[in-house]
Image (cartoon, helix red, strand yellow):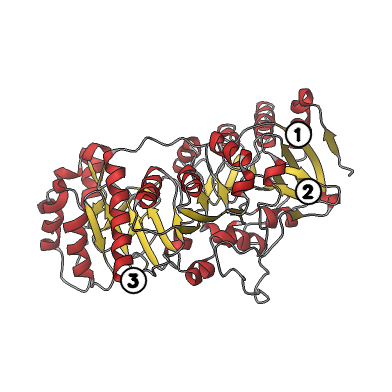
């Protein structure tokens, strides 16, 4: 295969990265492989940040726009934002430095449902992709790119980009990964065909991305492990939330609301998600189940090994490097139990609704009527973005949101009269769960929901405060005091503690 840059010696990697990064120009739109740090390029993006710093030191302008499947690692979002090299970013990020830059207006950021990214790129809504950077475990002479631990929007950006840079990462075992992916790209409307996934384990595509070899402008060989996320150890609050979720699902199983064979699950990322899955795995009343989800964490792999999870369909193996190595070392066991898909397939609302997926996601805050804020602190400061939670919530068989009842040492109530930013409306949210209890909102009127949420989910420090809010609210189908609805947030911003709220201060 002929490329513009092929330098193979590990001792020359720095030169390789510089040569590859030099293909990217000021103003370019870059599309990346991966989903979370898993499968995301790590070498060329870091070199691009150095190149940006050098140009800025010479007084030259240099910024790029970056489109991804989800978040990346510090070797992408982190280094690029610190180098002031990002002009625009979508759709999701978890990097602390990027978060600060987003909230102070340094970078333009668009928070987009992850299932919609590929279609928006194909439709031209986000501009023309100039360069795609793919992390691969193998590349063939005829342009077959075998991805690593994450997929995201890889097929779309690789096909549409003018140039493709491939990072072949020896940290991933190609003999294990080749064959694990199911790559399928949707057609543009109105010519889209049905997605023929009837079970979580169905495969409908190819195990690789096919590109025109003439577009491959550079190949870089690296050996860089994924920037795996670390999570806090379980604590009594997360354990109790996990147990409450498991108890709720078991109760629905006993009532027959959930079929006796159970239903596929989707789970978000983080400590609460791990606690929920651990509780489900330990519960003897829950049959072995499947996952149709966007991210698989260590807890899922542990349950696959014990037989509690029969199959995992995902977009990303967002696991620790030790766990990933365990998968590679035991690939004969895992090969028929895992599949990696593009995000527009793993997060496809139509597939989610047809399979009857039960969604389990976390909230920053929820209000007494069932609206959920997943993204903003006190309505203005971006935390992480909506991710894939909306893709699953709206179409789920049962949609569950969980969170601790308080934050900041009790100074913030996660249950409020009105969310300061709404990502998921009361029309999509079925159940809210905290360590205090379970609020089943299905089939309830707004006032019934409010009473259920306050009584079952609010922390004792805030329960009376929320009851008192209902007393001053103007009566209607959804009762509110417009002057006081965000009063608890205002008090926190002014005094640092929502418990100091006095509703008399907001009455007109």
| Viewer-nearest residue: 329 or 411 | 329
SS assignment at label 1: strand
Residue at 50%, 53% in the rendered image:
111
Q: Quadrant of residue 126?
A: bottom right
**Does 438 sit left or right of 182 as displayed?**
left
Residue 455 point in image, percent of width and height: 16, 58
**Does 112 sit left or right of 429 as displayed?**
right
Disc 3 designates what residue? 257
Q: How many angstroms separate mark 2 from mark 1 (CA)?
A: 17 Å
Q: Earlier in the sequence, mark 2 or mark 1?
A: 2
- State whether residue 92 is above or below residue 192: above
Residue 263 point in image, percent of width and height: 44, 65
Q: List the single residue furthest toward the bottom.
A: 190
Disc 1 designates what residue? 221
Image quadrant occupied by the C terminus: bottom left
Q: Earlier in the sequence, mark 3 or mark 1?
A: 1
């Amino acid at each position: 295969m002929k490329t513009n840059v092929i330098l193979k010696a590990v001792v020359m990697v720095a030169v390789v990265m510089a040569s590859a990064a030099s293909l990217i120009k000021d103003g370019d739109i870059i599309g990346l492989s991966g989903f979370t740090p898993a499968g995301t390029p790590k070498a060329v993006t870091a070199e691009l940040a150095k190149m940006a710093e050098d140009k800025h030191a010479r007084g030259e302008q240099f910024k790029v726009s970056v489109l991804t499947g989800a978040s990346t690692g510090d070797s992408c979002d982190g280094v690029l934002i610190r180098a002031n090299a990002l002009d625009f970013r979508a759709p999701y990020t978890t990097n602390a430095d990027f978060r600060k830059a987003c909230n102070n207006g340094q970078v333009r950021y668009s928070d987009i449902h992850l299932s919609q990214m590929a279609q928006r790129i194909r439709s031209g809504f986000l501009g023309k992709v100039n360069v795609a950077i793919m992390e691969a475990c193998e590349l063939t002479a005829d342009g077959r790119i075998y991805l690593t631990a994450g997929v995201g929007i890889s097929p779309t950006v690789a096909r549409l980009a003018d140039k493709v840079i491939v990072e072949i990462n020896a940290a991933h075992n190609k003999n294990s990964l080749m064959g694990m992916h199911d790559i399928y790209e949707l057609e543009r409307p109105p010519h889209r065909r049905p997605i023929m996934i009837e079970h979580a384990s169905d495969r409908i595509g190819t195990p690789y991305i096919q590109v025109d070899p003439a577009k491959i402008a550079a190949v870089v060989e690296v050996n860089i492990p994924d920037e795996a996320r670390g999570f806090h150890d379980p604590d009594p609050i997360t354990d109790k939330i996990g147990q409450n979720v498991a108890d709720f699902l078991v109760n629905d199983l006993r009532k027959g609301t959930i079929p006796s064979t159970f239903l596929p699950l989707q789970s978000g990322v983080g400590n609460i998600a791990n606690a929920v899955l651990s509780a489900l795995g330990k519960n003897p009343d829950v049959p072995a189940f499947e996952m149709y989800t966007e991210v698989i964490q260590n807890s899922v792999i542990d349950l696959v090994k014990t037989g509690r999870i029969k199959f995992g369909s995902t977009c990303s193996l967002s696991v620790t490097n030790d766990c990933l190595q365990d998968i590679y070392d035991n690939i004969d066991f895992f090969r028929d139990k895992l599949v990696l898909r593009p995000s527009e397939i793993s997060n496809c609302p139509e597939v989610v609704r047809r399979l009857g997926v039960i969604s389990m996601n976390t909230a920053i805050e929820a209000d007494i009527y069932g609206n959920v804020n997943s993204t903003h602190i006190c309505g203005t400061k971006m935390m992480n973005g909506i991710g894939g939670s909306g893709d699953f919530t709206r179409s789920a068989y049962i949609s569950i949101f969980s969170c601790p009842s308080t934050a900041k040492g009790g100074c913030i109530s996660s249950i409020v009269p009105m969310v300061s930013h709404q990502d998921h409306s009361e029309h999509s949210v079925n159940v809210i769960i905290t360590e205090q209890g379970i609020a089943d909102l299905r089939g309830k009127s707004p006032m019934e929901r409010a009473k259920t949420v306050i009584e079952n989910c609010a922390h004792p420090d805030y329960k009376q405060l929320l009851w008192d809010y209902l007393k001053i609210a103007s009566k209607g189908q959804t009762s509110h005091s417009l002057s006081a609805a965000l009063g608890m947030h205002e008090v926190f911003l002014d005094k640092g503690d929502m418990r100091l709220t006095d509703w008399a201060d907001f009455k007109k």
